[in-house]
Amino acid sequence: MADTQWLIAAGGVRGYIRPMTAPPELPAPVVDPVPPPRLLKIRSVATTGLFILAVFYTLHLGRPFFLPLVLAFFLAQLLRPMVRALTRWRLPAGVASGLVVLLLVGVVGAGFSQLWGPAADWVARAPRDLDRLEVKLKKLLRSVEQVTRTAQQVDEITDVAKPGGTAVELKRPSLLEVLFGGATSLLAITIIVLVLTYFFLSAGDQFLRKLPRVLPRGHAERVLGAVHQIEGQLSRYFLAVSIINLSLGTLTAIIMAMLGMPTPVLLGAAAAALNFLPYLGPAVMVTLLVMVALLSLPSTGAALIPPALYLLVHVTEANVVTPQLLGRRLPLNPTAIFVGFLFWWWLWGVPGALLSVPILVTLKAVCDQSEGLKNLGEVIGR
């Protein structure tokens, strides 16, 4: 074909058509290579892991700030049914919350005033009683004492410290620092928790009522339904656990009184309080009963009866009563409970161990209400 073409159009008119040339080639756009799906998945897992580590480090570093918040949140969940009952009587939420918090302070204060006298007597007699307890324990643990003396002699023989050297004394943290992560006063922590509890109780529903203003209507309704369901589960759980522990403490006090143990009411209160602390609380209570029984009862055989009966009551409560009452409200894997107890004890000390089960219950309730977290809920559930 020539460079030009002649075309005879309709009607006999000839027209000239310009030669057809190919358009100039444009440079191909530079496209970034797409990483393979496996690499994207590894990056996502690594980013999620770093985020979780950052959250845990923040919780550990900010323990004096986060711990009162968490304590107040769970205390508010325990008291929320009482506040709602008072609001049904046409009381404002602020007034009802204040009355409930004042009632809590009054009940706890009355209990402490009743138990303060026996506890002060025990503290005053502690040096003398510890000497008596040491004498009795030496008779029971002669072999252990002999091994201890041998170890002390080996330490003295192998001591290579030079005379006149500088002694370095390590400063140990106080009990409050161990328990509350550097908090200067237990009273200040208590006041902060009570004030936060009041605000959570009085202003909790106000935040929920504002959700439809900032979220789409359908999404806000789902969030409100999930939050109300989670709050209901937590409130019922805390109420049931409180009733179970108070019943355990009452039964322990009755048994200790029948066995002739001193201050049975104080021992029952200790049993109820320590039962909120999983694993560690019952172990501390058994040790305490062994010490008190050795000091108070005439023979070693009689001294073994109070801790044995308490252990029997606790095992029955933990394996029969609690599963029957909390089977649906506490669908947690025992392994997850133990791992959570160890983790929160490491992260926040004794308060963390105390809050480990409530935190797991909250996490399980959140996972059950979230489509993206149901797999995690299956892992920590039964």
Image (spheres, rainbow, N blue to C red):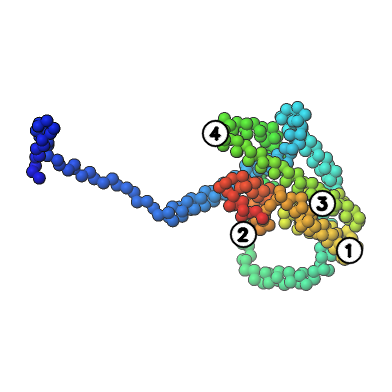
Q: Looking at the rendering, in which quadrant would you find the N terminus?
A: top left
Mark 3 surroundings: few (<14), some (14-19) or many (≥20) residues within 10 A: many
Mark 1 surroundings: few (<14), some (14-19) or many (≥20) residues within 10 A: few
Foreground label between 1 and 2? 1
Q: Can residue 173 be seen in this view?
A: no
Q: Distance between the residues labelled 2 and 3?
A: 53 Å
Disc on res. 166: 2
Query: Relative to 100, is 310 above or below?
Result: below
Give the structural element (helix, strand or loop) at label 2: loop
Q: Looking at the rendering, in which quadrant would you find the C terminus?
A: bottom right
Examine the image and state in which quarter residue 199 appears. top right
Name the residue rendered at 63%, 40% in the picture. 226
Q: In the displayed structure, does residue 24 sit left or right of residue 341?
A: left
Mark 4 surroundings: few (<14), some (14-19) or many (≥20) residues within 10 A: few
Q: Distance between the residues labelled 1 and 2?
A: 50 Å
The residue at which mark 1 appears reads as 302
Q: How far apart are marks 3 and 4 (CA)?
A: 48 Å
Disc on res. 248: 3
**In the rendered structure, which disc, 1 or 2, sits on the residue that comes first in sequence?**
2
Residue in front for this viewpoint, 166 or 339: 339
Q: Which amino acid does label 1 sit on?
A: Ala
Mark 2 surroundings: few (<14), some (14-19) or many (≥20) residues within 10 A: few
Give the structural element (helix, strand or loop) at label 4: loop
Query: Relative to 163, is 68 above or below?
Result: above
Q: How far apart are marks 3 and 1 (CA)?
A: 22 Å
Labels in figure, total: 4
The residue at which mark 4 appears reads as 216
Name the residue rendered at 83%, 61% in the picture. 308
Q: In the displayed structure, does residue 56 sit left or right of residue 260?
A: left
Give the structural element (helix, strand or loop) at label 3: helix
Q: What residue type is labelled 4?
A: Pro
